[in-house]
Amino acid sequence: MAKNVKRVVLAYSGGLDTSVIMKWLIEEYGCEVVAFCADIGQGAEVDEVKKKAINTGASKVYVKDLREEFVKDFVFPMLRAGAAYEGTYLLGTSIARPLIAKAQMEIAQKEKACCVSHGSTGKGNDQVRFELTYYSINPHIKVIAPWREWKMKGRAELVHYATLHGIPVPVTKSKPYSSDRNLFHISFEGGILEDPWAEPPEDMYVLTVSPQKAPDKPAYAEIGFKNGDPVSVNGKTLSPASLLKRLNELGGEHGVGRVDMVESRYVGMKSRGVYETPGGTILHSARRAVESLTMDRELMHLRDGMITRYAELVYNGYWYSPERTALQALVDTATAGVTGIARVKLYKGGVYVAGRKAEKSLYHPDFATFEEDTVYDQKDAEGFIKINALRLKIRSMVEMAGKKSAKK
């Protein structure tokens, strides 16, 4: 394959793995490497990407601002589905990969590159997420996955390689773990976190203060929703990216959104991950509050029954699969009427719903009240219960008859 590789588009972050990969591709394949970096809210690290890529050997560098698209077309649809992998992980890394891969393929087409490459290891989920997206867009694309090809076995060898080639190394003895950041979250894994009994060091966290050091006075925020999507904070209409950024700030100030879990990777092993998702944690609670007023019971239960499957599809990399698209259509139909405002209280790492309201609320005090009313005859409940108990009564009668026969 090496003889046929002329130009490769590399998904480049400027971190240890992709910096080493760029130099390795140039040396191993003798090819031209075009670096692509998606700005999805990594912060200051994006600023140095172009310079570092050129210094490492890239022939060209693309840095594309995808923050609004990331939140509007990827994060928000996932939030409408209520997705949380294994009930805990809010999928911050998982949901970013299909967007990065899609944009990378657009650059590959523009540059007429025959190959694309990524920095995912052969043990992780990201290799699947990237490559499933590549092939869904162009079934004939060639993929170079260095971690599955080279002889280097771990990051210690990568550090040695980087040192030999004069590549700056972001992983240090004081911070022996890797991180991945976007506008929705930041994740940490590896190094000292590989011991699931060890508590993460406090100085590791980036987006959130320690709940113990958070303000003693709670903060309130009102989040407005329209058809399932958040549109405003405290009465101010914001773009998707700006809204999430604001909630990240609010949540971070109060220690909201920390998760420490051991998860099941798609490739079969378990891994320990630590996450900070302040804005996403707030939005999950707020959206649920508005849904409780506006979503039909059976429609909500139908959507909720799909949460596990939807989350697995996102986690495993099937964003562009027909099944995820079909589930999304159901989710979007179910959440079409979720319009209203949720008031949440942020305090010492917790998010508490303090109120909710909606113009088209399905909640009516006249029906739910424990006081005297004229809209609900409590005697009707007797027939309702008897009809619903009929199958249980019949089953019990059959069981009782069987026991009598056994005694004879």
Image (cartoon, rainbow, N blue to C red):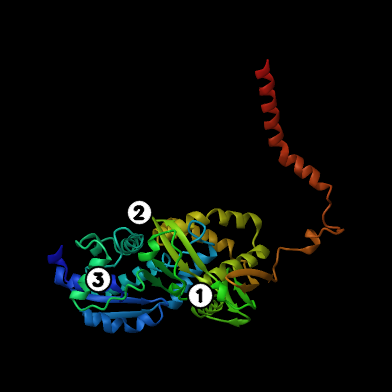
Can you tell which mark lies on residue 267? 2
State which tag comes first along the sequence, 1 or 3.
3
| Cα–Cα span, label 2 and label 1 | 31 Å
Q: Residue at x 70, y 66 (%)?
A: 361
Q: Residue at x 35, y 84 (%)?
A: 47
Q: Looking at the rendering, in which quadrant would you find the N terminus?
A: bottom left
Please rate how many residues cluster around mark 2, counting C-alpha atoms within 10 Å: few if below 14, some from 14 to 19, many from 20. Answer: few
Rendered image quadrant of residue 152: bottom left
Q: Is residue 123 left or right of residue 255?
A: left
Which structural element holds mark 2? loop
Residue 7 showing in the rendered view: no
Q: Is residue 295 left or right of residue 257?
A: right
Q: What residue is disc 1 on?
A: 208
- The percent position of residue 369, horizontal first and vertical second, equals 81, 60
User: Amino acid type of disc 3?
Assistant: Val
Marks 3 and 2 in Cβ contact (< 8 Å): no
| Cα–Cα span, label 1 and label 3 | 29 Å
Q: Residue at x 63, y 70 (%)?
A: 339
Marks 1 and 3 in Cβ contact (< 8 Å): no
User: Amino acid type of disc 2?
Assistant: Val
Q: What residue is disc 3 on?
A: 159
Which structural element holds mark 1? loop
- The percent position of residue 319, horizontal first and vertical second, equals 41, 62
Q: Residue at x 51, y 69 (%)?
A: 76
